Image: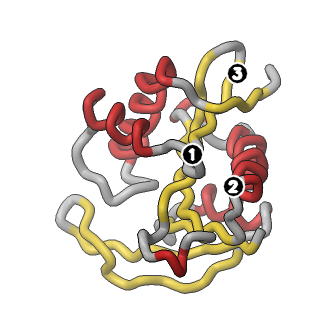
Amino acid sequence: MSATTIREAVSDDIEDILRIYNEGIEDRIATLEMEPKDIAYMEKWFEEHTRRYAVLVAEKESKVVGWAALNPYSHRCAYAGVADLSIYIARDYRGQGVGSVLLPHLEKVARQNNFYKIVLFTFPSNANGQGLYRKNGYRNVGVLEKQGKVDGQFVDVMIMEKLL
């Protein structure tokens, strides 16, 4: 098994980030999004992730197999030190430890950018994701019942957090 390397994402990674994100949408395990995104959507998203809101990619054998991003939790100044987390792993690499390498690197970047807390939202059914987060010191804050709909069905969303 090859080593996983982590680096800051560059514009040449946008297509890989999009591919992996669309797999997450299709698999209905990590997001309330329903429709696959296109390259224009992801380019705009990438442009908005500057300065403090970093995007990292995980590579195996020079192939992008996962990514993680810090996102604004709120635009209110009182929450300037809180980041929202996104992490997506390519379908064929899930459960192989990619997230366990990627997440600590993103936390280091968060600290360097003066974040003191990371929050995330996950489906209660996403046991693999929750295992990754708990292993890295995240705690369950609670569940928002019927927070959204996926395929016409209400879904709950679990909130987790970590103080850095």
Tell me whether the residue at label 2 lies in contact with that at label 1, contact meaning CB atoms closer than 8 angstroms. yes
Q: Residue beneath label 2, please?
A: 113
Amino acid residing under circle 1: Arg
Q: Residue at x 31, y 80 (%)?
A: 146
**Alpha carbon separation for disc pair 3 and 2:** 26 Å
Q: Earlier in the sequence, mark 3 or mark 2?
A: 3
Residue 154 percent coordinates (x, y): 27, 74
Residue 88 percent coordinates (x, y): 53, 44
Q: Residue beneath label 3, please?
A: 60
Furthest residue toward top: 62
**Alpha carbon separation for disc pair 2 and 1:** 8 Å
Quick one: SS at disc 1? loop
Mark 1 burial class by Cα count in 10 Å: few <14, some 14-19, many 20+: few
Mark 2 burial class by Cα count in 10 Å: few <14, some 14-19, many 20+: some
Q: Residue at x 71, y 42 (%)?
A: 102
Furthest residue toward left: 152
Q: Point out the image quarter for the N terminus.
A: top right
Q: Earlier in the sequence, mark 3 or mark 1?
A: 1
Q: Quadrant of residue 85?
A: bottom right
Residue nearest the observer in this picture, 154 or 21: 21
Quick one: SS at disc 2? loop
Mark 3 burial class by Cα count in 10 Å: few <14, some 14-19, many 20+: some
